[in-house]
Structure formats: structure tokens, C-alpha cells
Image (cartoon, rainbow, N blue to C red):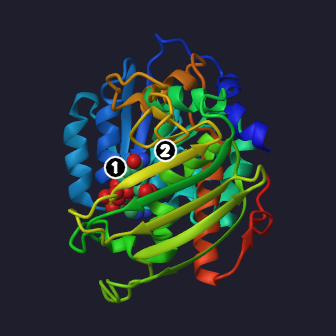
């Protein structure tokens, strides 16, 4: 499985029937809230790509998106199935709340469309399994919104790590700490605090961080344990069913242990906040989240830090550019279904361990990749 997960991206472009750069591609965005609007802005910068349809159940958002995409005069819909029925639309972006991704992605793939699906691929193993099956049956491109995979700096740094630059990976310690809870007056508050819709912080947000950990480690975890709770924001908003903090340990078949913590009450001035991914190797250690500087092991006699990759300007729409390149058969898929499903399942594994307060195994999730 490990080999498939991390080598798969390179070959995935072959899945797509080659479509030349000159061919105009007509795409659609389903869900034009915060993320969908950002994706739309990126799509509009892509050469020879037109927005054929926009879909949202909130009319104000649909209007705003239609204005942004006015150049292409897209048709607007409140029913996503009508978008899937459009034969001229060859790809769809799915940026709705997480619990809706699987049904939409499966329907789009079955209608022979290329799919860019926001993370997480699903919030339950059954949802992830359905998307995996549909993506494997289809000969279309499926790209998950794990856009860290398109950051050149990270790609270069992970390649160096996997090439042995810090020795064998022994242990990883990572966190995603925020200074505040998700805003209660934000329009996405209508799904965010419902664990059945968002999956909770770990599945909805830390899926990025956990994907980065898996990527560096070169594997998926085989089991996890942990504890989570709502410590500060009890019943805020009323009916809240997501945790506001959690601590987990993931155990990998290659012996690596990943310790991961998450909270939404890290005081801004307290050091060591925010996000990091500390990777401890047998020769050196680094923070993969922000840095590409590896620090050799040892005390005063340790050698100087080593720069693993050069920072450069990162294209904010690189993941979208990579998706269309892949659709045209001109580039690898940066986050294919194996990457997307593995990331979602890793966060589901951690979430389930916290909820059930026991060691949960990858096999129990029942999804074969
Ligand atoms: N990759 C990233 O960095 C990133 C960043 C932010 C959000 N996201 C992901 O994007 C997705 C959306 O998050 P958001 O922050 O934009 O939320 P949001 O609430 O701002 O937007 C979701 C939109 O989907 C619409 N919607 C809900 N049900 C629908 C339906 N049945 N048909 C059509 N539209 C429907 C809502 O009306 C809303 O406009 C989530 O999966 C989230 O995890 C990814």
C-alpha cells in the first residue's frame, strides 16, 4: 500500500484522455462559499478554461460568484444534480460542506467528469470507500483538495527527506493550534459545529497537517489512540458536537510514532503556537511545516544547519493549475484518490480513537486502498 500511496501521483496523468492545451475546457463549481469563491478566482486565471456553471443553495453567494465569473456568463443552479447532467461540462469542483463531498464526487465521476474535490474526501469510512470505488472505476482525473501537495517547497523538502537527507525518520511531533474557535457568526457555522457534517476540527482542518505527516513518513498509520474533549466551548453554539481539543498518537508500520495535538485556545503570545510538523531523523531534525532547514543531531558540536530546499514564490493556484494539466494529460496528479482517501482516513482514524477512547486500527476502517 505504501508504494501505491506515494508513487501513484506520477502515473495518474495517464488516466486522463489527453486533451491539448488549445482545447477549451468547461468546468463548474458546486458550493461557492469561502473556499469555492477562492477556487473560482483561481480557475478564472487558467488558460483556456471557462466556467460553464455555478451551483449553491444560498442565492446571495450564487449571485456574487456569477458576478465574479461574468466573463464566461455561467448558468447558475441550486440543484447540483442539474450541473452533473450538463454534457458540455467536463469537470467539476466540489467545495460544499464535507458530508456532501462523497455523493457529489461519485455522481460526477459516474457521469464521466473529472473531479476536483475539496478535502476531506469524506467524513466516514463508508463515504471515503464510495469515492475510492468510483474513482477507480472511472478513467477520469480525481484530485483531492490537499493543496500542500502542490507547494514546490514542500515537494522539494519531502523529496530530500525521502532521499535520506535527515537519515531514517524516527518520530514526528505535529500540532494544529488556533487562537480561537471557529466563528459562530460565520456562514459556515451552519454545518461546522455538527460533527456529522464537518467531522470536527481534526477531520475538517487537520486533514492537511496529517497528510503532510504521512507524506514525509512515506506511509499511512496502522493504528491510533487518543483523547479529545470540548473543554472551553461547551455547548457553544448550542448543540455543538465537535471537540475543541485533542491529543493523539499514530503508530506506523515502519516504527514511526506521530504525536499530534489540536486546540482552539492557544494564547497568541504563548510561544510554540500555530502549526508545526517536527520530523526527527537519525541524522537531523526539521520543522517541515514552515522550514526547510535541517538541524544536525548533537549538542554544541553538531554541524551547521542545512537548507533542504530553496524558498521561492509559490503560485497560490498551483493545485488548480496541476488539476487542469492532469486533465489535459500534461502533468502528474498532485493528490489523487489514494492521497485524498489516505488523508481523510488518517484523520477519521484519529477522530474515532478520541471518541471511542481506545486503540483503533486502520484495518477496522474497512477501506482497501
Ligand atoms: N483546501 C483548503 O485549504 C480549504 C480551505 C477552506 C475550506 N476548504 C473546504 O472547502 C469546503 C467548503 O468550506 P467553506 O469554508 O468554503 O464553507 P462555506 O460554508 O463557506 O461554503 C460551502 C458552500 O456550500 C454551499 N452548499 C451547501 N449545501 C449545498 C448543496 N447541497 N448544493 C450546493 N451548494 C451547497 C453553501 O451554501 C456554502 O455556500 C469544506 O470541505 C472545507 O473543508 C478547504
Residue 366: horizontal and vertical position, in percent? 78, 64
Q: Can you identify the residue that label 2 sits on?
A: 145
Instruction: Tell whether 329 sits left or right of 46.
Output: right
Q: Residues within 10 Å of mark 2 (few under 14, many from 20)?
A: many
Q: Cβ(mark 1) to ligand 1 < 8 Å?
A: yes
Dot 1 or dot 2: first in sequence order is 1
* Res. 257 image quadrant: bottom right
Q: Cβ(mark 2) to ligand 1 < 8 Å?
A: yes
Q: In which of the image's four quarters is ligand 1 placed?
A: bottom left
The relative height of residue 353 versus residue 96 in the rendered view (above or below) is below
Separation of disc 1 and disc 2 at Cα?
A: 10 Å
Instruction: Tell whether 38 sits left or right of 2.
Output: left
The relative height of residue 353 versus residue 336 in the rendered view (above or below) is below
The relative height of residue 233 versus residue 252 in the rendered view (above or below) is below
**Disc 2 secondary structure class:** loop
Decide if residue 77 is in sight here. no
Q: Can you identify the residue that label 1 sits on?
A: 35
Decide if residue 216 is in sight here. yes
Most extreme residue toward the front, as rendered? 301
Q: Residues within 10 Å of mark 1 (few under 14, many from 20)?
A: some
Instruction: Tell whether 191 sits left or right of 64.
Output: right
Tell me the residue at 69%/80% (across/down): 358
Instruction: Tell whether 51 sits left or right of 158.
Output: left
Q: What is the total number of numbered labels drawn onto the structure image?
A: 2
Residue 237: horizontal and vertical position, in percent? 30, 84
Residue 116: horizontal and vertical position, in percent? 51, 41
Tell me the residue at 59%/57% (across/down): 344
Tell me the residue at 51%/34% (across/down): 302
Comparing 86 with 129, the one in front is: 129
Tell me the residue at 22%/34% (across/down): 70
Question: Is there a contact, CB below 8 Å, between mark 1 and mark 2?
Answer: yes
Amino acid at each position: 500500500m505504501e508504494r501505491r500511496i506515494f508513487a501513484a501521483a506520477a502515473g495518474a496523468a495517464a488516466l486522463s484522455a489527453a486533451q491539448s492545451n488549445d482545447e477549451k475546457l468547461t468546468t463548474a463549481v458546486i458550493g461557492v462559499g469561502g473556499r469555492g469563491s477562492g477556487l473560482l478566482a483561481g480557475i478564472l486565471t487558467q488558460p483556456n478554461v471557462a466556467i460553464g456553471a455555478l451551483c449553491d443553495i444560498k442565492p446571495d453567494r450564487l449571485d456574487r460568484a456569477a458576478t465574479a465569473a461574468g466573463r464566461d456568463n455561467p448558468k447558475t443552479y441550486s440543484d447540483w444534480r442539474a450541473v452533473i447532467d450538463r454534457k458540455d461540462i467536463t469537470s467539476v469542483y466540489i467545495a460544499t460542506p464535507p458530508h456532501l463531498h462523497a455523493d457529489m464526487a461519485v455522481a460526477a465521476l459516474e457521469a464521466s467528469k473529472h473531479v476536483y474535490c475539496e478535502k476531506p474526501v469524506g467524513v466516514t469510512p463508508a463515504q471515503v470507500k464510495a469515492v475510492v470505488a468510483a474513482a477507480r472505476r472511472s478513467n477520469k482525473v480525481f484530485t483531492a483538495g490537499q493543496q500542500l501537495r502542490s507547494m514546490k517547497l514542500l515537494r522539494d523538502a519531502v523529496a530530500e527527506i525521502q532521499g535520506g537527507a535527515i537519515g531514517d525518520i524516527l518520530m514526528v511531533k505535529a500540532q494544529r493550534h488556533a487562537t480561537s474557535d471557529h466563528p459562530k457568526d460565520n456562514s459556515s457555522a451552519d454545518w461546522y459545529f455538527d460533527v456529522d457534517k464537518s467531522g470536527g476540527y481534526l477531520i475538517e482542518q487537520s486533514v492537511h497537517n496529517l497528510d503532510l505527516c504521512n507524506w514525509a513518513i512515506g506511509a499511512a498509520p496502522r493504528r491510533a489512540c487518543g483523547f479529545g474533549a470540548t473543554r472551553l466551548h461547551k455547548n457553544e453554539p448550542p448543540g455543538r458536537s465537535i471537540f475543541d481539543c485533542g491529543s493523539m498518537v499514530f503508530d506506523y508500520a515502519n516504527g514511526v510514532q506521530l504525536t499530534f495535538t489540536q486546540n482552539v485556545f492557544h494564547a497568541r503570545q504563548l510561544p510554540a503556537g500555530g502549526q508545526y510538523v517536527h520530523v526527527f531523523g537519525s541524522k537531523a531534525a526539521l520543522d517541515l511545516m514552515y522550514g526547510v532547514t535541517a538541524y544536525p543531531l548533537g549538542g554544541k558540536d553538531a554541524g551547521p544547519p542545512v537548507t533542504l530546499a530553496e524558498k521561492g514564490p509559490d503560485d497560490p493556484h498551483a493545485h488548480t493549475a496541476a488539476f487542469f494539466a492532469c486533465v489535459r494529460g500534461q502533468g502528474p496528479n498532485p493528490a489523487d484518490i489514494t492521497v485524498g482517501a489516505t488523508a481523510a482516513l488518517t484523520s477519521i482514524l484519529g477522530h474515532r480513537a478520541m471518541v471511542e477512547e481506545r486503540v483503533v486500527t486502520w484495518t477496522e476502517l474497512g477501506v482497501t486502498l
